[in-house]
Image (cartoon, rainbow, N blue to C red):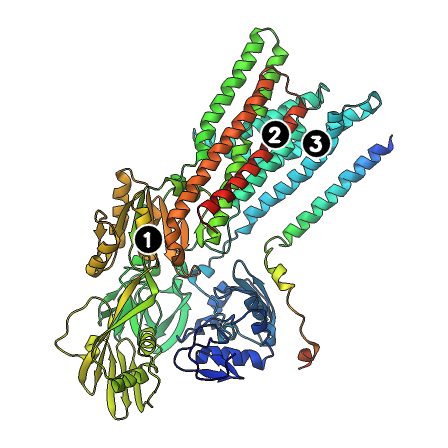
Amino acid sequence: MNILYFLIGCSLFMALIFLGAFFWASRNGQHDDVHTPGVRMLFDDDKPEEEKQ
Amino acid sequence: MKSSATSTDALCYHCGNSISGDLYVADDKQFCCAGCKGVYQVLSQNNLCNYYTYNQSPGQQKQEAEQHFEFLNEPKIFSQLVDYTDKNVTLITFYVPAIHCSSCLWLLEHLHKLNKGILQARVDFLKKQVAVTFNHNEISLKMLVELMVSVGYEPLISLQDIVKENKGSENRGLIKKIAVAGFCMGNVMLFSFPEYLGLSSFEHQFQSLFGWLNLVLAIVVTFYCSRDFFISAWGSLRQKVINLDTPLAIIIAVLFIRSAFEILSSSGPGFTDTLSGLVFLLLMGRWVKQRTYNHISFNRDYRSYFPVAVTLINDGEEKPIPINDLNIGDRVLVRNNEIVPADSILMKGEGYFDFSFVTGESQPVTKVLGEIIYAGGRQIGEALEMEIVKPVSQSYLTRLWNNETFSREDSKIKNFNDTIARYFSAVVLIIAFTAAGAWYFLGDSSRAWDSFSAVLIVACPCVLALSTPLTLSTVLGFFDKNDFYLKNTDVVEQLARIDTVVFDKTGTITCPNVVNLSFTGRLNLYEEALVASAARNSSHPLSREIVKWLAVKHILPVENYQEIAGKGIFAMIEDQEVRLGSRSFIAPDSLPSDNSSSVHISINGRYKGFFKIKQQWRNELKGLIDSLKPKFRMHLISGDTSSERKNLSSIFPENVPMLFKQSPHDKLNYIRKLQWSQNTVMMLGDGLNDAGALRHSDLGVAVTDNINNFTPGCDAILKGDSLYKIPQFISHAKSAVRIIRFSFAIATVYNLIGVYFAVQGKLSPLTAAVLMPLSTVTIVTFTNIANRYLAKKNKLK
């Protein structure tokens, strides 16, 4: 059962990674505007021939 | 789409307005004006017609007024406006009120196609902001702004842009704390579970490990996540008041101390799960309460009404300078539609000022040379030269805003939570001490401590801290959908307390945009055609209304046309001399004096009559007044003349006091007088001129037709079309308060059950851990369902 000590350490460590990821996202401003990206992704890509002009 | 080019009921392809009068055509598409057509042509030349595919007629009609952006080339102003700049690249954030649909978003993010110098543009849709990165060697800031104006997205650049505030940081700190609390809660739950299920003898080796891990996490929760509760509780204790955070801080402290004690002495598992869960939920409640709808900015003041720069005249040279650099004695140029930046003397030109923002008077007034013009007036007509007599910071308008009486303490709203928190804390402490005392006298001193801490733990006001913000923010959301925007959740409770409603007249109960024309005099068909042909050349709103009203089909060619700004127009048509304009422009001697603004007409020097513009009441004003009549005392105060008294008395009941020609200070004093006689006053006003009254009233509501326009420091913003819903809003606010009271009753039942166990000193960690989330879930479900049901009952969307 000693393996449990290791597993508990793992689970805590992974949770800490996720917490760190959240902090990183928050500092990057990913939560500042949660509306616009949802609209932006619906736009069509530009047609290639337009790019050449 | 109809093929006939002359159909008059067609809609403009760009802005969607119905096309009246002239038709502009490009690429088989119809436009209402040259402005709309121009924007379309710019877009189609640059392959940006996708703009029109995402939404039907997404544009907005362009304002005709000439714009001057020379000031943007001034290095000093430039550096104050931009967010970042280096040798090549500049980043600037604009506020663009016109943003309203996905097409706007698409076009603004494709600005780089219109000019190579623009590197990137990012839109924040809800805040209506565009962050543009551009190469200032290729495109100047002025050109960038002009480019945006040319496609119909004019950025609003006001004095407020110079003072940039950092708003997001406080909110981010809270979110961080929530994340940490959530992390701790999850792990503590995980480590506490074996304890709930019962440990077999062989698992006992883990007990102390789990205990220690829990304690570490509890330290983080107590000393990092709940710091704000302790700070707030301590602050309020020093002022000798008890707010809601006081009992919360006590509970968190007791929970932590008892858990630490149990874990360190290996006498039990402690209450770390309850502690972390509680803190997590409390922080969530705080976040919900803080989260306001950020598509409306309440924190604007007079600065957002003033321009960034003015044109200074120095030795005959015109030079834009920042408004804060203005000194007494400076000569400035004020063009058509520009605002007088500071109190000044008129030196050159003929002034025709619209002071509606300062005095509420809707008609522009004429000012002659040498007169003092107060800041805030908007010049209509020719460019003027003025000499500054007072710096901006001491002007009438700024003084009005900075006036001590106008600023108010934030604590004017006493909410239910803080009131109840005082009694709550007292009752809980009494029970806790009684229980502890009883056990102590019975000789069981360890139980005394157990019961004392257990009572404090279980009798948690967390429902109050959670259900109130949840209920009120749901209400805020409902109001938001109905175009009624509240500053924060406390305003809802305040709304429920209102017993007196004070109306301002102009712009509040009248419709500023709808013009009601009537013609006094006589015109034959030919003369009508003459007037319409002359008037359609003018961009003045009244001329446009006249063209619409006359609805003449045959437009005659105009030979000689002159427009004298602020006075009228003069045109030669088929050798007929047509004059339209103000009374002094037409100059007949015997005219009845009239209070409402009018347009007079003469043809070949013969007076023909006048168009009278009547103010139109808002829709369903009568219905609104009738439904408010039985429940509220009403008052009407207006800065205007009493010319409308007769009309108003047919709408308002007889006992409503009506006051006219009230200055901003009179309005403020009137509100104060009402409050002295124990009334809770809601003031509905429109603008800056009643800003003092709005601020001083118990609930100041700014009624406006364009919510992006300047809004004074008020508690709520109401869109003009929703004015008639006020009774529904009030009754829903009252329901919300009832919901909060009822959820408090539910919480009390739960608390009594908990206290029953607690006073016996038998509260197990499991009971506490189950009881708390159970009561929370019940209450959250209840408030949500009740809120939705009552919103439907009050006919809110």
Q: In the rendered structure, which disc, 3 or 2, sits on the residue that comes first in sequence?
A: 3
Amino acid on which disc 2 is placed: Met
Instruction: Kindly identify which chain the residue marked by label 2 belongs to.
Output: B
Label 3, secondary structure: give it: helix
Label 2, secondary structure: give it: helix
Percent position of residue B739, x then y: 48, 37
Q: Is there one chain holding both mark 1 and mark 2? A: yes
Instruction: Tell me the residue at 33%/53% (across/down).
Output: B623
> Which of labels 3 and 2 is toward the front?
2
- Residue count near mark 1 (Cα–Cα under 10 Å), binned few <14, some 14–19, many ≥20: few
**Rendered view: B379 above or below B4:** above
Q: Which residue is mark 2?
A: B772
Dot 1 and dot 2 residues touching (CB under 8 Å): no
Question: How far apart, in angstroms, are the residues tagged by discs 1 and 3?
Answer: 63 Å
> Which of labels 1 and 2 is toward the front?
1
Percent position of residue B108, x then y: 56, 69
Q: Which residue is mark 1?
A: B623
Instruction: Kindly identify which chain the residue marked by label 1 belongs to.
Output: B
Asked whether residue B344 is in view, the answer is no
Instruction: Tell me the residue at 62%/44% (across/down).
Output: B176
Instruction: Kindly identify which chain the residue marked by label 3 belongs to.
Output: B
**Rendered view: B533 above or below B486:** below
Question: How far apart, in angstroms, are the residues tagged by discs 3 and 2?
Answer: 22 Å
Q: In the rendered structure, which disc, 1 or 2, sits on the residue that comes first in sequence?
A: 1
Q: Which residue is mark 3?
A: B216
**Rendered view: B443 above or below B628:** above
**Rendered view: B307 above or below B408:** below
Amino acid on which disc 3 is placed: Val
> Which of labels 1 and 3 is toward the front?
1
Percent position of residue B777, x then y: 60, 35
**Viewer-nearest residue: B596 or B284:** B596
